[in-house]
Image (cartoon, rainbow, N blue to C red):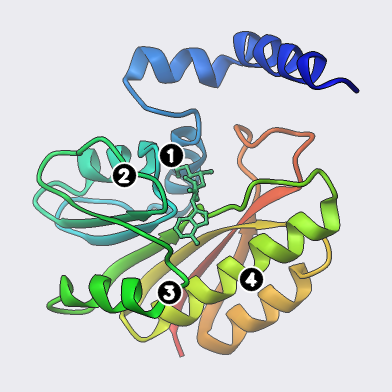
């Protein structure tokens, strides 16, 4: 398909999408907010006072939701891209996979955190197996980083793509956490292989 036809299709899809329209009404920067909201409705994760690390946070709709619900808590958001500020939360711009960025995050943490979440995704190639492997690597990196920083009862949430690395990621999750669930919110597009892994209780 030609490039301008693809972008026309994308624009039309966005116009029809109820979550895109609702995000404008609710003041969220992206429709992604509703995926986290659905995860929260199902797993009852967010409440006042939580400390949360949001990896792959831009443009910031997950962070906006957390900032609203985890009042008086602590929020650290990380992304390759610069984000508009969200209240007094901490924002770090850089590549999460770099050691220096992970060290920078740790400097802001004074005690173990309640939630580490990652919606990181590479620019998709359209080749499902490659997208699954690359996003899977980001998920594994985030999981490895999170497990030592989280409270025993904390939550790790991450985007994954069904495909090549799915079983491996679930197995990795079970190594570090007692509870591992996979959930696809209704707001995650049906034609996308995207899903979310929700892990709890550090082993
Ligand atoms: C789907 S978007 C996140 C949307 C976000 N959850 C929201 O609600 O606005 C994925 C993000 O992951 C970021 N990302 C991808 N690889 C990354 C990396 N290595 N380090 C930091 N951020 C990364 C991208 O820059 C992009 O902004």
Q: CA distance from mark 1 to mark 2?
A: 11 Å
Mark 1: give few (<14), some (14-19) or many (20+) Cα within 10 Å. Answer: some
- Viewer-side label of 4, 2: 4
Q: CA distance from mark 4 to mark 2?
A: 22 Å
| Label 4 residue SS | helix
- Residue contact between numbered discs 3 and 4, judged by CB atoms under 8 Å: no
Mark 3: give few (<14), some (14-19) or many (20+) Cα within 10 Å. Answer: few
Closer to the chain start, of discs 3 and 4, is: 3
Mark 4: give few (<14), some (14-19) or many (20+) Cα within 10 Å. Answer: some
| Numbered circle sitting on residue 137 | 4
- Viewer-side label of 4, 1: 4
Closer to the chain start, of discs 2 and 3, is: 2
| Numbered circle sitting on residue 63 | 2
- Viewer-side label of 1, 2: 2
The answer to whether residue 191 is above or below residue 56 is: above
| Label 1 residue SS | helix
Q: Residue at x 75, y 59 (%)?
A: 132
Closer to the chain start, of discs 4 and 1, is: 1
Closer to the chain start, of discs 1 and 2, is: 1
The answer to whether residue 29 is above or below residue 158 is: above
User: Taking 112 as reference, is 19 left or right?
Assistant: right
- Residue contact between numbered discs 2 and 3, judged by CB atoms under 8 Å: no
Q: CA distance from mark 4 to mark 1?
A: 25 Å
- Viewer-side label of 3, 4: 3
Q: Is mark 2 within 8 Å of ligand 1?
A: yes
| Numbered circle sitting on residue 98 | 3
């Amino acid at each position: 398909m030609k490039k301008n036809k693809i972008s026309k299709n994308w624009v039309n899809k966005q116009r029809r999408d109820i979550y895109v329209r609702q995000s404008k009404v609710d003041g969220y920067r992206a429709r992604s907010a509703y995926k986290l909201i659905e995860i929260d409705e199902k797993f009852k994760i967010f409440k006042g006072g939580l400390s949360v690390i949001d990896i792959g946070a831009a443009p910031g709709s997950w962070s906006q939701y957390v900032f609203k619900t985890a009042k008086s808590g602590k929020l650290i958001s990380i992304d390759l891209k610069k984000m508009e500020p969200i209240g007094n939360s901490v924002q770090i711009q850089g590549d999460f996979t770099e050691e220096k960025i992970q060290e920078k995050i740790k400097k802001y943490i004074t005690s173990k955190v309640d939630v580490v979440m990652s919606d990181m995704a590479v620019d998709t190639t359209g080749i499902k197996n490659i997208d699954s492997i690359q996003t899977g690597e980001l998920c594994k990196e985030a999981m490895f980083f999170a497990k030592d920083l989280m409270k025993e009862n904390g939550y790790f949430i991450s985007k994954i793509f069904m495909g090549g690395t799915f079983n491996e990621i679930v197995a990795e999750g079970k190594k570090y956490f007692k509870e591992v669930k996979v959930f696809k919110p209704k707001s995650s597009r049906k034609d996308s292989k995207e899903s979310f892994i929700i892990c709890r209780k550090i082993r």
